[in-house]
Image (cartoon, grey):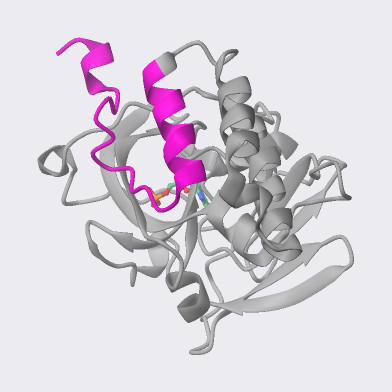
Amino acid sequence: MKSEDRYPKKSEHIRLDNYVRRDVIKALLGFGAASIVPIGIWKWINASPYLNNTPAPLRKTLEFNERLTSKLLSDSHLAPIFSKSEAVKNVRVNGNVGLATPVSEDYKIKIESGEKKFEVSLDELKTLPKQEIIFEFKCIEGWSQVQHWGGVRFVDVMNHFKIGQKDAENLFEYVGMETPDGQYFVGIDIPSAVHPQTILAYEMNGEPLVDKKHGSPLRLIIPVKYGYKSLKRVGIIKFTDSRPRDYWAMYGYDYFAGL
Ligand SMILES: Nc1nc2c(c(=O)[nH]1)N[C@H]1C(S)=C(S)[C@@H](COP(=O)(O)O)O[C@H]1N2
Ligand SMILES: [Mo]
């Protein structure tokens, strides 16, 4: 199979939940040249009388979406996707830093974005559209596996809770994520965080993620980066302009770990 055949031309695994997103995905998959796309989206948003008549708060959200999508398009590279039958049943385990303490029943994720500080439950995250991804998970130690994960897109979480925005014009540059005990931590650049394949996963192989070793109850899956960025057991999410600390970068591995 040629590698380009694996790209999600028909977006089999990408669920489209609103028009802005549909446009973005179409653009990502169809046009190829990212440079034409932002203008197309800008035109689409601005030409729509419906949007121009929307009440202020919704309009604000849409503008926020627009900013996110232009960021997203600057990083339009998509990881190749696979079919369900190609995904392994026995998902390999690697690394257990920050997974020692038991997790409580009412698990909550602490989020901080500028002045905003709040906690989110898993149930709340599960109300957002579900995104599944089957891709080749790559560990820098030299192994890879086709894995199947499901959860919520990080960009949707940002839009839903209106987080990640520094001021009226700009997004923060990074997001840092940590295990609840702060023992394992990753720093992610915002273009990669808002990438359409970046998810907070609560399912593995179509089943609830119950295995602590794989990061239950919630883990990051970021296909555009090496495995060490896919933090297991997300407990803290914080947006910043300075580079958040990163566990393996501390030991000399590449901070961005892009694929
Ligand atoms: N909390 C935590 N997350 C982590 C790690 C870890 O040690 N602790 N290891 C990382 C590395 S190096 C890899 S390859 C993947 C492995 O995920 P898996 O065990 O589900 O295969 O998790 C990443 N996330
Ligand atoms: Mo890894």
Q: Toward which corner of the image does residue 116 lie, by quadrant?
A: bottom right
- Image coordinates of residue 11 in percent, x first then y, are 28, 35
Task: Residue at 70% x, 29% y: name it.
Answer: 252
Q: Residue at x 61, y 76 (%)?
A: 120
Q: Position of residue 195 (x, y in %)?
A: 54, 37
Residue at the far bottom in the pictured view: 105
Left/right placement of residue 118 relative to residue 42 reads: right
Percent position of residue 135, x then y: 31, 36
> Residue 12 in magenta?
yes
Side (left or right) of 203 relative to 220: left
**Relative to 221, 130 lies left or right:** left
Question: Is 101 rendered above or below residue 88?
Answer: below
Q: Tell me if I can see residue 248 in this picture.
A: no
Percent position of residue 18, x then y: 44, 51
Query: Front-most of 34 and 45?
Result: 45
Q: Nearer the viewer, residue 163 or 46?
A: 46
Q: In this rendering, is residue 137 above or below 8?
A: below
Picture residue at 37% right of the left edge, 19% below the top: 30
Over which residues does the magenta segment extend? 1-30
Q: How many marks?
A: 0
Vertical order, 166 against 125 (above or below): above
- Residue 20 belongs to the span the image colors magenta: yes
Q: Height in image: 158 above or below 36?
A: below
Give the quarter of the image for residue 209.
bottom left
96 or 12, which lies in front?
12
Quadrant for the N terminus in the image: top left
